[in-house]
């Protein structure tokens, strides 16, 4: 989803530039003034697109959490161990730190003999 998010951000900025550039060129008949208005429109639309994308991604995460936490009967479907319940699943830095510490402390299951 990160690649799609980046392209959505760029696409919204391009749409803003195009709309403001064409409107300013039609109103002022001056290319430098239209370029200035187009750059301001690009910045405005990209900020609005980023805000909209943040709302969509947050709604997607919340919907996924609801689906994972409940099955058809409303009972909890996930069997979380005590170590996983202390970690906020939405914070990737904490989850990555925990995964790295578990990987460093686990013993290998297969030992090679020479």
Image (spheres, rainbow, N blue to C red):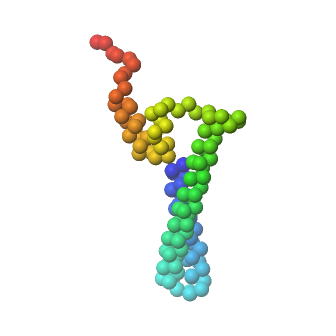
- Judged left or right of residue 77, residue 94 is left
**61 or 33: which is nearer to us?**
61
**102 or 39: which is nearer to us?**
102
- Whether 9 is drawn above or below 88: the answer is below
Looking at the picture, how far across and down is residue 31, in whole percent? 51, 82
- Whether 91 is drawn above or below 72: the answer is below
- Whether 27 is drawn above or below 66: the answer is below
Query: How many numbered discs?
Result: 0
Residue at position x 63%, y 41% in the image: 67
Residue at position x 58%, y 58% in the image: 55
Name which quarter of the figure residue 107 lies in. Answer: top left
Name which quarter of the figure residue 54 lies in. Answer: bottom right
Residue at position x 59%, y 55% in the image: 56
Residue at position x 49%, y 74% in the image: 39
Q: In which quarter of the image is the C terminus?
A: top left
- Judged left or right of residue 111, residue 25 is right
């Amino acid at each position: 989803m990160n690649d799609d998010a980046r392209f959505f951000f760029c696409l919204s900025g391009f749409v803003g530039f195009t709309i403001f550039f064409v409107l300013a060129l039609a109103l002022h008949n001056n290319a430098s003034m239209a370029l200035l208005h187009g750059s301001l429109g690009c910045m405005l639309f990209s900020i609005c697109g980023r805000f909209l994308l943040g709302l969509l991604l947050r709604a997607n995460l919340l919907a996924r959490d609801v689906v994972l936490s409940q099955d058809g009967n409303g009972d909890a479907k996930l069997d979380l161990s005590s170590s996983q319940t202390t970690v906020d699943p939405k914070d990737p830095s904490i989850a990555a730190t925990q995964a790295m510490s578990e990987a460093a402390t686990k013993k290998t299951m297969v030992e090679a003999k020479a």
